[in-house]
Amino acid sequence: MSGANVHPRGQNGADIVDDVGTQLAGSSQRFTATRRAIVSVLADADGPLSIPEIMEATDDLAQSSVYRNLAVLEQAGVVTRVSGVDDRVRYELGEHLTGHHHHLVCTSCGAVADVRIPDALEQDLERVLTRLAASAGFAMEHHRLDLLGRCAACR
Amino acid sequence: MSGANVHPRGQNGADIVDDVGTQLAGSSQRFTATRRAIVSVLADADGPLSIPEIMEATDDLAQSSVYRNLAVLEQAGVVTRVSGVDDRVRYELGEHLTGHHHHLVCTSCGAVADVRIPDALEQDLERVLTRLAASAGFAMEHHRLDLLGRCAACR
DNA sequence: ATGAGTGCAAAGGCTTTGCATTAGG
DNA sequence: CCTAATGCAAAGCCTTTGCACTCAT
């Protein structure tokens, strides 16, 4: 939530916004004020945000612009869709910007927070999953691991 | 997809349907033909099904009945909502009926198939996640692990 | 018998689309 | 300049709800 939120790759919100500008330029997409605002809000969040949350945090953006820009940003690989426990769609910055992580999902209020697991386990996991996928004829691209339960606020 | 699909707890579709009958009775919910049909379809599937898939497989059920019954079954703990990569909601039988498992999610066609990981890894995972959750003030209830990639049909 | 379940159709809510206007490169 | 992006409002689509009828216990 804080503007000083530090990401594991060592980038702060401003750095991330710069990176995205470069990335969008590469996809021949413009980096408009609206996109900047959305990225900036996501960069400052400590977990994926729902569209209402994004709209509230950006203020004065047409809904359609938010939807359209999230689609563009997703297409360009800047943001990723995340599913929680409610059917509400959430978005976060791509892991190339924030680093690989997982989620704490509250089954009571639906909030989602980022969490990282120890490297050793992450590597075990990746190794086993890769084998598993191969034996199922499945071309794994990545994995998704969520902890479901009650957040500190809902306990 | 096959009616002879065998579940890890060693129950076949028919056994599961019986169990659900008992479970529903315990929740003072009737076990109607519609509910039987839905449970039976889910028991025979090899992964979570979307609502269109359920309707197609049951045939001749009103949409509203499917929605309402899935809600009842979810409430009673018989079925669980699963999220794939599309925003389409999917349902599967609860793990007390099917055993603990994870999902192969195809990023191309959206299909979801069940998969199990080795016990050893599962236990490591559970142990680490429990500690992790505790240190984040989060009361973990369970975890969710998906492999995302391209299924055999979409490679 | 009697309250829950069902089907049909209408209402709801989130998401997408069309179109004229504005602004980025 | 010239095309893409924006805002507003209308249209779509999946899901939920209301209501009269039927069925399970």
Image (tube, coloured by chain):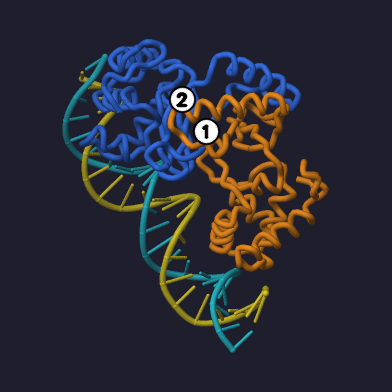
Chain colours: A orange, B blue, C yellow, D cyan
Q: Residue at x 21, y 36 (%)?
A: B60
What is the distance, in whole Å, between disc 1 and disc 2 at their CAs?
9 Å
Specify the subunit that label 1 lies on. B
Percent of width and height locating residue A117: 70, 29
- Residue occupied by mark 2: B115
- Does A131 appear above or below A3? above
- Does B36 appear above or below C22? above
Position of residue D9 in the picture relative to residue C8 (left or right): right
Percent of width and height locating residue B132: 71, 24
Give the number of marks: 2
The tag on residue B112 is none
Percent of width and height locating residue D20: 21, 40
Position of residue B14 in the picture relative to residue A112 (left or right): left
- Does A98 appear above or below A69? above
Q: Quadrant of residue A120?
A: top right
Specify the subunit that label 2 lies on. B
- Could you tell which of marks 1 and 2 lies nearer the N-terminus? 2
In the image, B86 versus A108, the foreground residue is B86
> Disc 1 on helix, strand or loop?
strand
Amino acid of disc 2: Val
Asked whether the beta carbons under mark 1 and mark 2 sit within 8 Å of each other, the answer is yes
Q: Neighbour class for label 1 at 10 Å: few (<14), some, many (≥20)?
A: many
Q: Residue at x 28, y 15 (%)?
A: B14
> Disc 2 on helix, strand or loop?
strand
